[in-house]
Image (cartoon, helix red, strand yellow):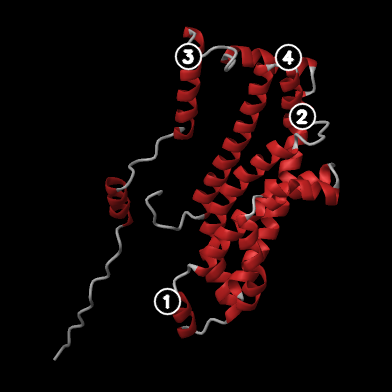
């Protein structure tokens, strides 16, 4: 008598159908170059308003006047040097703030003892605007580069810490139970589960940190700076050069927009394994 072996059919998840459902019920297909639609529309409204006289030059210089002012600053003044000086301040302060905030978040997020030492002071600092502490920083560090970099770093630190810490503590406890079941030790659990799980929070904190670093840059460059976009704006304000002021503001906006776009692009690549409506 021959026995017949029946095997259950193996079901392979149809990822194509899942993507179709997410796009149908979610925001839809990704649009190429969609990041630039909003700024392009704003530029069009600005141009039309200036050309028709709805936007007075005394209130806001026309885009073509800003382009002329940009050329003048580039050719006859050291605009490139000012851009480099601002980028250097922002990058050094942002790097210092991101590294410090991430380290503190990991220590606090993975240890109750670390949380008891770190979380309270960070939350208190969160309630005190960093810009209000600048007079104290001037008394401590003077009005040189050190004060400027530390201010930017402290502004950047808080969002990195808050979102990374929240990402660490927001990981589903079922992963810990699963790790215990299959015999994963604490170090492997942290390395392979906890830190990757906290990455979305860290990247969200990066977006806020980038914006915050530019906010700090705008302020600190008004304190005895001899180079930088803020220095250029301060001189333009003294001479009533509205078009030069707008040049500086546009450069600040481009800095922030490009940095935020870079963080979002990196997040989509690094977190490609996540099944979200973004995909």
Q: Mark 4 and mark 2: span between their CA atoms?
A: 16 Å
Q: Mark 1 and mark 3: span between their CA atoms?
A: 57 Å
Q: Nearer the viewer, mark 4 or mark 3?
A: 3
Identify the disc placed on residue 231. 2
List the residue tagged with mark 4: 72
Q: Nearer the viewer, mark 2 or mark 1?
A: 2
Residue at position x 55%, y 48% from top? 266
The one of 20 and 94 positioned closer to us in this rendering: 94
**Relative to residue 104, is residue 189 depicted above or below?**
below
Q: Earlier in the sequence, mark 4 or mark 3?
A: 3
Q: Earlier in the sequence, mark 4 or mark 1?
A: 4
**Relative to residue 152, is residue 252 depicted above or below?**
above
List the residue tagged with mark 1: 174
- Please identify the residue farthest to the bottom as the structure is shown: 1
Q: Nearer the viewer, mark 4 or mark 2?
A: 2
Q: Nearer the viewer, mark 4 or mark 1?
A: 4
**Callout 4 touching callout 1 (CB < 8 Å):** no
Q: Position of residue 142 (x, y in %)?
A: 86, 45
The one of 127 and 109 positioned closer to us in this rendering: 127
Q: Is residue 229 visible?
A: yes
* Screen quadrant of the N terminus: bottom left
Q: Is residue 93 visible?
A: no
Q: Mark 3 and mark 2: span between their CA atoms?
A: 29 Å
Q: Residues within 10 Å of mark 2 (few under 14, many from 20)?
A: many
Q: Earlier in the sequence, mark 3 or mark 2?
A: 3
Residue at position x 79%, y 19% from top? 77
Secondary structure of residue under mark 4: helix
The one of 7 and 38 positioned closer to us in this rendering: 38
Instruction: Tell me if 105 is positioned left or right of 47 in this view.
Output: right
Identify the disc placed on residue 123. none
Secondary structure of residue under mark 1: helix
List the residue tagged with mark 3: 49
């Amino acid at each position: 008598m021959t026995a017949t072996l029946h095997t259950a059919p193996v079901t392979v998840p149809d990822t194509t159908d899942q993507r179709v459902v997410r796009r149908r019920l979610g925001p839809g297909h990704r649009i190429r170059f969609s990041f630039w639609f909003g700024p392009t529309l704003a530029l069009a409204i600005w141009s039309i308003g200036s050309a028709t006289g709805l936007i007075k030059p005394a209130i806001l210089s026309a885009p073509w006047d800003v382009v002329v002012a940009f050329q003048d600053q580039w050719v006859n003044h050291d605009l490139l040097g000012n851009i480099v000086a601002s980028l250097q301040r922002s990058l050094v302060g942002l790097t210092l703030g991101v590294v410090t905030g991430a380290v503190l978040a990991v220590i606090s997020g993975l240890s109750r003892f670390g949380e008891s030492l770190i979380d309270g002071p960070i939350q208190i600092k969160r309630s005190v605007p960093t810009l209000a502490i600048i007079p104290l920083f001037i008394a401590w560090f003077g009005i040189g580069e050190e004060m400027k970099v530390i201010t930017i770093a402290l502004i950047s630190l808080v969002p990195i810490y808050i979102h990374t810490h929240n990402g660490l503590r927001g990981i589903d406890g079922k992963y810990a139970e699963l790790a215990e079941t299959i015999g994963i030790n604490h170090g492997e659990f942290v390395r392979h589960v906890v830190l990757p799980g906290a990455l979305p929070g860290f990247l969200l904190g990066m977006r806020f940190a980038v914006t915050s670093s530019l906010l700090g840059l705008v302020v600190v460059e008004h304190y005895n700076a001899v180079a930088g976009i803020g220095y250029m704006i301060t001189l333009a304000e003294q001479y009533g050069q509205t078009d030069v002021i707008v040049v500086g503001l546009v450069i600040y906006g481009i800095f922030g927009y490009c940095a935020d776009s870079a963080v979002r692009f990196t997040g989509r690549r690094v977190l490609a394994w996540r099944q979200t409506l973004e995909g």
